[in-house]
Image (cartoon, rainbow, N blue to C red):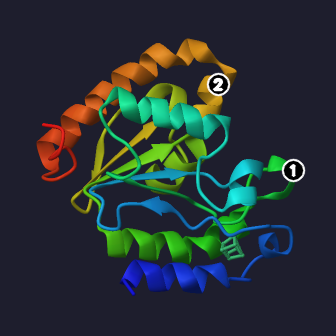
Amino acid sequence: MSELGKLEKDCMLCRSCELCKTRKNVVFGEGKKDAEVLFVGEGPGSSEDEIGLPFVGRAGKLLDTMLELIDLDRSKIYITNMVKCRPPENRDPLPAEKDLCNIWLAEQIRIINPKIIVCLGRIAAMRFLGKDFKISRDHGKFYEQDGVLITALYHPAALLRDPRRRPETFSDLKALKAEILRVCNSTYKEVN
Ligand code: SF4
């Protein structure tokens, strides 16, 4: 079993925070095990909790469309969330839950070793880029941390709520593709 597979197996048994009591499934993540591009959202919603995979509801369908716009699909990237179990009634994960769950995300990042991390939404962006990060101001910018490029897009759920943000996101996606082509070796191999 791969190192990531072993981590997933351990994560499935995690009962470190209260979210284990209300979850149906742990949503560990999905995609290429050595992806150069890692997408990180906030936490699973009800569809994800039912199925055990990230971004499978309406927001997930929009994420797939966003990926298609830049010739990507889930087989070429890895997608996960900051917390692996659904917060009840779609509330935000609590700081303690995010802190406790960070052990899994940190290990995923260590093992996958991505060149680019794409935060989906404000909460994930603040985890990587600090509390002062403002999604309306800072989306689409690239930051370098320890040799890894980090950027943030509007969360697909936010784009469903406010479609006026979509043109900005389209520009961000085009910039993301340019950065992937610049720093990644294999992500676009099959299509270019
Ligand atoms: S949210 Fe994270 S820390 Fe809490 S039980 Fe689930 S996997 Fe464990």
Label 2 packing within 10 angstroms: few (<14), some (14-19), many (20+): some
Q: Position of residue 28 (x, y in %)?
A: 57, 68
Q: CA distance from mark 1 to mark 2?
A: 19 Å
Label 2, secondary structure: give it: helix
Residue appearing at x 52%, y 56% in the figure = 127
- Residue 160 occupies quadrant: top right
At label 1, the amino acid type is Glu
Q: Is residue 81 visible?
A: yes
Report ligand 1 position as a quadrant. Answer: bottom right
Label placed on residue 89: 1
Looking at the image, residue 144 lies above or below residue 96: above
- Total of numbered circles in the picture? 2
Which of 154/12 is in front?
12
Residue appearing at x 44%, y 40% in the figure = 152
Does the Cβ of the disc 1 residue fall within 8 Å of ligand 1?
Answer: no
Left or right: residue 140 versus residue 16 is: left
Residue appearing at x 30%, y 59% in the figure = 35
Residue appearing at x 48%, y 37% in the figure = 64
Left or right: residue 129 versus residue 186 is: right
Which of 154/147 is in front?
154
Q: Is there CB contact under 8 Å for labels 1 and 2? A: no
Does the Cβ of the disc 2 residue fall within 8 Å of ligand 1?
Answer: no
Q: Is residue 139 visible?
A: no
Which of 183/57 is in front?
57
Looking at the image, residue 39 lies above or below residue 95: above
Q: Quadrant of the N terminus?
A: bottom left
Label 1, secondary structure: give it: helix
The residue pinned by badge 2 equals: 160
Looking at the image, tell me whether mark 1 or mark 2 is earlier in sequence order.
Answer: 1
Left or right: residue 14 versus residue 174 is: right
At label 2, the amino acid type is Leu
